[in-house]
Image: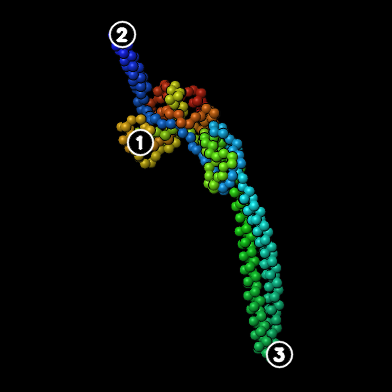
């Protein structure tokens, strides 16, 4: 009897908790008339820091979770093979410059030869008209002039080719110098290290990723709303995010993206009924100026709810009006 009594008390306790949760849930949604909402997780734009040239990793001076600034070194590579290639490319530039100088000298000689051949032909032509020399002598002078013209054209072509070769050689030097910048892989912008993908001693191939960063100025939550609801929304409209970990804090946000195409709601949406509907993806973004002030507190992956007013004449419920300090931080910018 005593055992049955304990079981009854346990059952009543469970029912009380369930009922309390149910009525709490009802109370939390009864004040949402004119407000659309959906569940999601806090996400941030990820940035992969990769190399364009393969090499052995010398050091990775960052750790996962560490904050970095734009320009900070996140990995150092051994690119000695590129350094050798650069030396060869610079030597090639010097050689092509010498070839151009030689080609320019040949042009000058060919121009002098043509000037002389032209004078010889003019004199032979005049003498031939006066019958002072034979037509054969005149023809020889004419052929010499034509040969000099051809030699000058060839010399100029060689000079153009030599000039082009210098441009090609200098471009190769610039290309290798640009690749050598990857000896020190740097953060393209400020963020938090999400993944450290390599360790010293490992060999990276071209295109290999060293580190993945999170851009904590681009933090958002993606939710899925019905056609009827999306039709009432506009980009830039005010919204709120409430995280499960901080249920009493309404974070100011705004609509940054509305998908132009409907889709079946993904699996992470809680109910099967909702998953079977065609919905539109909506991205709700936290203002960058707010993130900048609280950047050390920004955490991705946290689940929560995003709320958007569909009735613009209606005020936010008290619990969604937003923390006064947060609202001030947004409005002061």
Of residue 58 and residue 283, the one placed in the foreground of this image is 58
Q: Residues within 10 Å of mark 1 (few under 14, many from 20)?
A: many
Q: Please give the label number shown on residue 2.
A: 2
Q: CA distance from mark 2 to mark 1?
A: 50 Å
Nearest the eye: 206 or 188: 206
At 49% from the left and 22% from the top, the residue drawn is: 324
- Identify the residue at the far bottom of this view: 131
Asked if residue 110 is positioned above or below residue 126 in the image, the reply reads above
62 in relation to 92, above or below:
above
Residue topped by disc 1: 265
Task: Tell which circle, 2 or 3, labels the residue nearer the N-terminal end.
Answer: 2
Residue placed at 60% from the left, 52% from the top? 175
Which of discs 2 and 3 lies nearer the camera? The answer is 2
Q: Secondary structure at mark 2?
A: helix
Q: Quadrant of residue 34?
A: top left
Q: Position of residue 106 (x, y in %)?
A: 68, 70
Q: Residue at x 66, y 86 (%)?
A: 138
Q: Residues within 10 Å of mark 2 (few under 14, many from 20)?
A: few
| Location of mark 3 (residue) | 132
- Disc on res. 310: none
Label 2 – label 3 distance at C-alpha: 149 Å
């Amino acid at each position: 009897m005593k055992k049955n009594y304990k079981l009854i008390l346990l059952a009543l306790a469970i029912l009380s908790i369930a009922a309390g949760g149910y009525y709490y849930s009802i109370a939390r949604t009864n004040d949402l008339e004119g407000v659309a909402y959906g569940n999601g997780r806090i996400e941030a734009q990820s940035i992969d820091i990769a190399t364009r040239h393969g090499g052995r990793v010398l050091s990775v001076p960052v750790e996962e979770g560490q904050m970095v600034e734009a320009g900070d070194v996140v990995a150092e590579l051994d690119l000695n093979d590129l350094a050798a290639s650069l030396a060869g490319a610079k030597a090639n530039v010097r050689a092509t410059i010498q070839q151009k100088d030689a080609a320019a000298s040949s042009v000058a000689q060919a121009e002098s030869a043509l000037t002389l051949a032209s004078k010889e032909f003019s004199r032979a032509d005049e003498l031939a008209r006066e019958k002072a020399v034979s037509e054969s002598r005149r023809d020889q002078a004419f052929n010499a002039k034509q040969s000099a013209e051809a030699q000058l054209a060839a010399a100029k072509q060689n000079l153009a080719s030599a000039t082009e070769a210098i441009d090609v050689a200098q471009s190769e030097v610039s290309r290798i110098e640009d690749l050598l910048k990857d000896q020190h892989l740097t953060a393209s912008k400020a963020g938090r290290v999400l993944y450290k993908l390599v360790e010293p001693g490992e060999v990276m191939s071209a295109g290999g990723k060293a580190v993945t960063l999170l851009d904590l100025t681009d933090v958002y939550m993606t939710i899925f709303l019905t056609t009827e609801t999306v039709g009432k929304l506009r980009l830039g409209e005010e919204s709120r995010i409430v995280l499960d970990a901080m249920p009493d804090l309404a974070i100011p946000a705004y609509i940054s993206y509305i998908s132009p195409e409907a889709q079946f709601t993904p699996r992470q949406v809680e109910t099967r009924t909702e998953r079977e509907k065609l919905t539109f993806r909506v991205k709700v973004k936290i203002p960058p100026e707010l993130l900048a002030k609280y950047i050390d507190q920004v955490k991705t992956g946290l689940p929560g709810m995003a709320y958007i007013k569909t009735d613009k004449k209606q005020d936010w419920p008290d619990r969604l009006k937003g923390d006064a300090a947060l609202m001030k931080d947004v409005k002061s910018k």
